[in-house]
Amino acid sequence: MRRTAGYIAIFVVGFGAAFVALRGTGLFTRVNDSQAKQAVLRILNEPLPSTPAADSALIRAAAIIQPAVVNIDTMEERRQAVQDFLGNPLERQLTFQGKGSGVIISPDGYVVTNNHVIDGANIIRVTMVDGRKFDGRLIGADKVADLAVVKIDGPTFPIADFGNSDQLRVGEQVLALGNPLGVGITVTHGIISATDRHDLSVGDGRFLHQAIQTDAPINRGNSGGALANLQGQLIGINSAIASENGGGNIGIGFAIPINAARSILKAVITKGRTLAAVPESPFVGIVFRGLGANGASELGLPSGQGVLLVEVKPLTPAADAGLAAGDVLVEVNGKPIKSDLDVKTAVTGRHVGDEITFGLIRRNGTREQVKVVVGRKPEGLKQR
């Protein structure tokens, strides 16, 4: 402590000595205040240099997709039952406001967003990057997939071109665009952290069956916005973040892959109604778990291969095809099942009406090939 204090004291004393020496020699002069003002005003009045930012893939991509990304503001009115001070029942009306994002996908004003952004809204207001505002009307929504389509009317709108989310690679640079915290359209930058997240619980009873993970900063209000590649193409709809204690971004954001979203959006637009009661999520009706090393060994399978059917739901595609509890699935579409993720991926990657061929071992030891036609998932069920 003494050594440090001595060092500081020496420094201060040395500075003071130099100051006195300069004054004594006349080298320290006072500048006239008027001259100082004139000098700084000349600097402030100088023309600015013309040095635009160097062009880059990020700048080009943002310029391409940004005009198609919109703010979405909502207003919802709800009636709430209360009691007066005498205990008599009353009803009061509450107003809730929400903010989110959307992406225009057609020149005549179809906008894709998340269902949770517009769910229950009485008023939907869409604001473009250039400040124009439009009243939106709900065309339809899929509550399970957390996707919705809103329509705005006006002149030809800028649109986002679709990319191919199946071709994404971990480490690929991406942009996230949306309306975080209601501040207005914002562009952030990051990479693809993972391409194949499955069955993520994102709160309020919502699950993302397929998701792209990115570290591009995404915050509340980004929901429904765009995840874009360096060609400025739409590759995902930003939908959720992982955070600590309900806070902001910590580098873990999730987007619905655009390839998975397209078939859902087509169904929403075609049917023109809310699909919450008849979700289009693929479903076969099985509950399963890994065999483990011992179980695989008993059946003569390589370690880790195969899954055991713990339950087959009645009146489901799996039950209709003849699958039963106790059966062991060893192949799906001709490929060995090495983990339960292989079965999950096989189901979530299909559409209603598709066929999945399972190779299985029955409880009596016989092997069979069984074809299951993928059905529509009943609302509220979490099983495959």
Image (cartoon, rainbow, N blue to C red):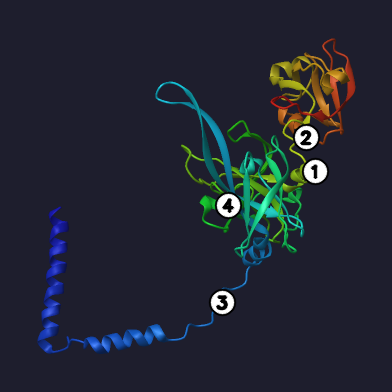
Determine which of the numbered discs, if any, sits on residue 52 in the image: 3
User: Tag 1 or tag 2, which sits nearer the N-term?
Assistant: 1
**Measured Cα–Cα span from mark 3 to mark 4:** 25 Å
Crowd band around label 4 with a 10 angstrom C-alpha radius: few (<14), some (14–19), many (20+): many
Amino acid of disc 4: Ala
Image marks 2 and 1: residues in contact by CB distance under 8 Å: yes
User: Tag 3 or tag 1, which sits nearer the N-term?
Assistant: 3
Crowd band around label 3 with a 10 angstrom C-alpha radius: few (<14), some (14–19), many (20+): few
Local secondary structure at mark 3:
loop
In this view of the protein, can residue 366 be seen by the observer? Answer: yes
Q: Quadrant of residue 304?
A: top right
In this view of the protein, can residue 172 be seen by the observer? Answer: no
Residues 379 and 321: in front is: 379
Local secondary structure at mark 1:
helix
In the image, which is nearer the foreground, mark 4 or mark 2?
2
Residues 296 and 371: in front is: 371
Q: Mark 4 points at which residue?
A: 216
User: Tag 4 or tag 3, which sits nearer the N-term?
Assistant: 3
Relative horizontal placement of residue 30, taking residue 189 as reference (left or right):
left
Amino acid of disc 3: Pro
Q: Locate the C terminus and report the quarter of the image it occupies.
A: top right
Q: Is residue 235 above or below residue 282?
A: below
**Measured Cα–Cα span from mark 1 to mark 3:** 42 Å
Amino acid of disc 2: Glu
Crowd band around label 2 with a 10 angstrom C-alpha radius: few (<14), some (14–19), many (20+): many
Q: Name the residue under label 2.
A: 280
Local secondary structure at mark 4:
loop
Q: In this view, does 382 lie above or below 42?
A: above
Determine which of the numbered discs, if any, sits on residue 263 in the image: 1
**Measured Cα–Cα span from mark 1 to mark 4:** 26 Å
User: Tag 4 or tag 1, which sits nearer the N-term?
Assistant: 4
